[in-house]
Image (cartoon, helix red, strand yellow):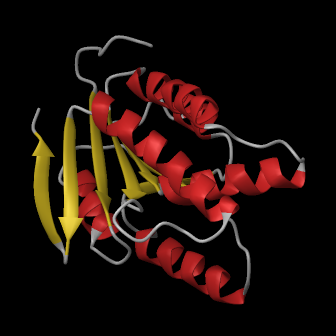
Amino acid sequence: MANKSSGNHLLYISGGARSGKSSYAEQRALSLAGPHTYVATCPVLDEEMAARIELHRQRRAGNCWHTVEEPIELATALSTTRDSGIVLVDCITLWINNLLYQADTNSKPLSEDWMQTTTENVIDAARRGKRTVIFVSNELGMGIVPADGLSRNYRDLVGRCNQALAAHADEAVFMVSGLPLTLKKP
C-alpha cells in the first residue's frame, strides 16, 4: 500500500440510495481547483439506465469534467487519471455489482478476502499523485439480511470494500436526507 503522498487526499462518501451522495460529491469536487475527472462505473443495462447515463453526461457537459467510463478496471482508471487534480469515482456499489456479474458469468465466486485485496489495489492507485480522489458508495448494511446467497454475498462484498475505503480515507462523510454527517475529519 502506497504511503499518503503530500497533496493527496481521499474522501469517502456513503449513504443510502437517493441520500444526496452524488450531488454532494460533485459539489465538493467542483469547489476544488481542477482538472476534474469523473470515473463512471455504470454500464448501460437497459433503456432506463441509458437515459440516466445520458442525463448525467449532459449535466457534466460544459463543466470542467473529463469523463472516464470504466465498469470493471477501477485501479487502472485511477492510474490513468494521475494528472487530474480531482477524481470523482461514482459509484463503488455499481463497480462491485459489475465485478460480481463478471465473476458469476465466469463461474468464479468472489470472496471478502479477494474484495479486500482488490480494494487495497484501488486505494493504492488512488494514492498516487497529488490529487483529491472522491469515492461514492451506498451503505447497504442497514437493512434486513437478504433472502438469497447472491444478494448476501453482494452486501458482504460492498461492506468489506466500504470498510477498507473508510479506514484509508482522510475524510469520511455519511449522507442522510441530503445532509452530510462527518464521520472522519482530515
* Residue name at image x 55 percent, y 69 percent: 146
- Can you say whether 48 is above or below 101 in the image? below
Q: Quadrant of residue 19?
A: bottom left
Can residue 5 be seen here? yes
Please give left or right for residue 156 compared with residue 84 in the image. Answer: right
* Coordinates of residue 107 in the picture (x, y in percent): 89, 47
Quarter of the image with the C terminus is top left
* Coordinates of residue 92 in the picture (x, y in percent): 49, 52
* Residue name at image x 70 percent, y 41 percent: 110
- Can you say whether 77 is above or below 60 in the image? above
Please give left or right for residue 94 compared with residue 144 in the image. Answer: right
Residue located farthest toward the right when viewing the structure as drawn: 106
Please give left or right for residue 154 compared with residue 3 in the image. Answer: right
* Viewer-proximal residue among 61 and 178: 178
* Coordinates of residue 38 in the picture (x, y in percent): 46, 53
- Can you say whether 92 is above or below 15 in the image? above
- Can you say whether 98 is above or below 110 in the image? below
Q: Quadrant of residue 53?
A: bottom right
Can residue 41 be seen here? no
Quarter of the image with the N terminus is top left
Count of numbered badges drawn on the protein? 0
* Residue name at image x 27 percent, y 52 percent: 29
* Coordinates of residue 85 in the picture (x, y in percent): 33, 36
* Residue name at image x 73 percent, y 83 percent: 46
